[in-house]
Each structure stands twice: as C-alpha cells, then as structure tokens.
Image: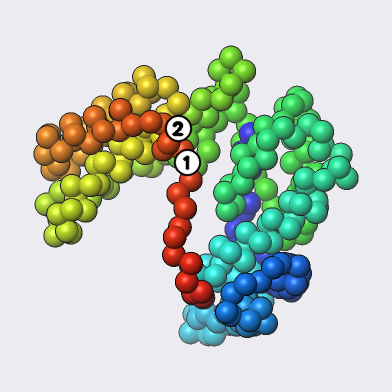
Amino acid sequence: MTLDVESRYTNIPQEATLEVISNLLSNSIWDFITPQEFVLDLAHLALTRNFFEFDKNFYLQIQGTLMGSTFAPSLACLYMDHFEKEMVLTEDNPFFDNIKIWKRYIDDIFLIRKGTKEEATAFVTWLNALNPFLRFTSTMGDPAISFLDLLITEKNGLLKTEVYYKPTDRNNLLQFHSFHPRSLRENLPVGQFLRLRRNCTELTDFKKHAKKLNDKLQVRGYPAYLLRRAEKRARFSNRETLLQPTTRTNKEDTLIV
C-alpha cells in the first residue's frame, strides 16, 4: 500500500518543527563553519515570517511553511522523520509487528504490511488519530501498485519494478531543435533510457518502455542515430551499478534559504 500526507508543507506545526530542529542540532556532531544558532534562526525565519497577499490584503502564515521555499522540504522532512520514529516505527504502535517495509520520499510512503485489508484500513484510521497536523490518504494494491514513477509488482514472493506513467502524462520532452546547448540535447536521450534501465527489473519491461520512449523522442525531433546509440548504451549498462547512489564531492559550507 502507499500513503500520502495531505498538504504537508502547509500543515506542519511551526513550534514543534523548531523544537525538532533544535534537538537535532544539539545532539549532532557539528563540523561546519556556520554556527548552529544561526541555522536555528534561519529556520525560525523560514517558518514564522511568511507573508502573502490575498484579495488586496496581507496575511501572516501561522501554520506550516511556505510552498516553494527552498527550506520547506528540509523542514517538513525533519518533522516527518521525528513523527515516524516517535509514533509509527516504535513498539508502542499496536500495528508495528505487521509493518515489514516503510519507505518515505518527502510526503509519499511505500508500505508493505501483513494482514487483511480491514486491518490495513484500521491502521490508517489509527495513523490519522495520532497527530492533528498530519492526515494520510492510502491506496492498496494487489498485486501491483504505483509509487512515484514506479509500478511495483509482487511476483513469486519478490518485488519487481517498471516505469509508471500517470494518466495525465504528456510528451513534454525537450524539442531537439530547441536553442539549448547541443551537448544537453544529445545527452537527454541517454539519461532517459538509463532511467528506464534503472527502474525496470526485467529486461523485457525495459525493451517495452524503450520502444515507447523512442517513439516519443522521434516526435520531438531527435535523430534516429542518437536514439539507437542511447538505447544501446542503456541496454548494456549494468543495472546494479545504475542503482548505486551517487556521492556529492562538493563539501562547501553553503546555506540557501
């Protein structure tokens, strides 16, 4: 099943989020030039000094954080991490033993649990009673469910994935004759085909989606030789290597709020 946190950015409690950040800073090993107190001051400003205009009147946002703010995802994720550890992924949770996998990306949660659908519904009801600021909606899938850009299917006791496109998906890939740098336009198909190879567990699924992607890119004006080269590179790439996380080498002490 999947869970989605409704309007997470605009619903997180400001004071509680600041308390979470303060505790994390106090308990962390801080080896940055920027003082911890300054980071906390920035978080306070980002949460409590958001003004907006509506119908020619100005308002101060008193709950949640500003949609579109650079700091917003970090603030919301820190609060959600605290909520999960303190309320959900703990043995005090009466449904804890049924949870086999709990993975979250920002406000989208992928969950595997044992039990009946009725018990799953009871779990979501219990979850929604924990915190007045967080409300979860759920979707159950058997044997397949979509999560972000993946279609996840149970097959012989294992999970397989392939690319998932929402019903509203449109072919908005960059036109090849755009005035973007040529290197960007020539490398775009490579990135798109490598994404398919990474997200498709089985090679047959990759080939199926590669054919669709090839058609979409041709419509956008990409030469056939570029597409053949990009598809071949992806097809013969090591999927295990593609699944490895990339590491950032830039360790500058940079703050963007």
Q: Compared with residue 131, is residue 138 higher up or lower down, i.e. above or below?
A: above
**Residue holding disc 2:** 240
Is 138 or 256 nearer to us in this picture? 256
Q: Residue at x 37, y 22 (%)?
A: 203
* Image quadrant assignment for residue 18: bottom right
The spot of residue 88 in percent (x, y) is 78, 47
Left-right relation of 148 to 61 = left
Left-right relation of 106 to 36 = left
* Image quadrant assignment for residue 17: bottom right
Q: Compared with residue 100, is residue 84 higher up or lower down, i.e. above or below?
A: below
Q: Compared with residue 251, is residue 47 higher up or lower down, i.e. above or below?
A: below
The Cα–Cα distance between marks 2 and 1, rounded to whole angstroms, is 7 Å
Residue type beneath disc 2: Glu
Q: Compared with residue 183, is residue 231 higher up or lower down, i.e. above or below?
A: above
Q: Residue at x 59, y 74 (%)?
A: 32
Badge 1 density bin: few <14, some 14–19, many ≥20, Cα 10 Å: few
Can I make out residue 81 in this image?
yes
Element at label 2: helix
Residue type beneath disc 1: Gln
Q: Residue at x 21, y 39 (%)?
A: 217
Is 133 or 208 nearer to us in this picture? 208
Badge 2 density bin: few <14, some 14–19, many ≥20, Cα 10 Å: few
The spot of residue 225 in percent (x, y) is 12, 34
Left-right relation of 115 to 239 = right
Q: Are marks 2 and 1 in contact (CB under 8 Å)?
A: yes
The spot of residue 109 in percent (x, y) is 62, 44
Say which quadrant the N terminus sits in. top right
The spot of residue 34 in percent (x, y) is 58, 80
Q: Which mark is residue 244?
A: 1
Can I make out residue 61 in this image?
no
Is 174 or 253 nearer to us in this picture? 253
Q: Residue at x 36, y 42 (%)?
A: 169
